[in-house]
Amino acid sequence: MNRIELPTKTPETTIILPRNGWDFSAYLLQGETIVNVVAQSSVYSGSDPFANEVIFSATPSGTVAIVTLTAGSPGVIYLIQVTVTTTASQVLSLAGYLAVTPELP
């Protein structure tokens, strides 16, 4: 599984991360697009009994998966995994670590 870099977020923000989406174009054939997206989150470090609620939504957009992340517990690092199915029936995954930081005073 390939890894991407995700910036940190605060618990108060709901945001698309990374900003341009999860780009699978390097793994697709010419003309191939994404038809289904499944995003999952789990705790890598720390504790959050509601880790699966960090994923707000996940939708396909051409060769990119748009994943909106929300909430999270300060100090927790989440493993975010995005798996897509393509028009050529490929199943591909990317993953990244998301650190949730407290809001600064």
Image (tube, grey):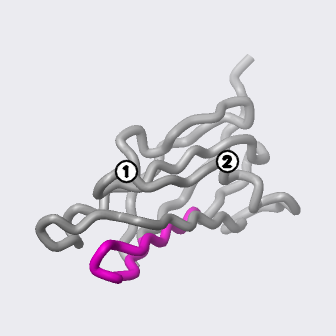
Residue 96 image offset from top left, x and y in percent: 48, 62
Q: For the point 47% across and 67% down, which residue is it?
A: 36
**Picture disc at residue 61:** 1
Task: Please say if 29 is above or below 64.
Answer: below
Left or right placement of residue 23 versus residue 1 in this view: left
Residue labelled with disc 2 = 56
Q: In this view, does 6 lie to the left or right of 27?
A: right
Looking at marks 2 and 1 on the same chain, the residue that comes earlier in the sequence is marked by 2
Give the extent of the magenta segment.
Answer: 80-93
- Magenta stretch contains residue 77: no
- Between 19 and 101, the one nearer to me in the picture: 19
| Residue 30 drawn at (x, y percent) | 11, 68
Bin the neighbour count of mark 2 within 10 Å (Cα to Cα): few under 14, some 14-19, many 20 and up.
some
Q: Is mark 2 on a helix, strand or loop?
A: strand
Q: Is mark 1 on a helix, strand or loop?
A: strand
- Which residue lies at the image location 31% right of the left edge and 73% below the top edge? 87
Residue sitting at 63 percent across and 66 percent down? 40
Q: How many marks?
A: 2
Residue drawn at (66%, 64%), measured in percent from left and top?
A: 41
Magenta stretch: helix, strand or loop mostly = strand
Measured as percent of width and height from the top left, residue 83 is found at 48, 72
The quadrant of the picture occupied by the N terminus is: bottom left
Residue 13: numbered disc: none
Residue 6 picture location, percent across and down: 46, 50
Locate residue 13 relative to residue 33 in the image: left or right.
Answer: right
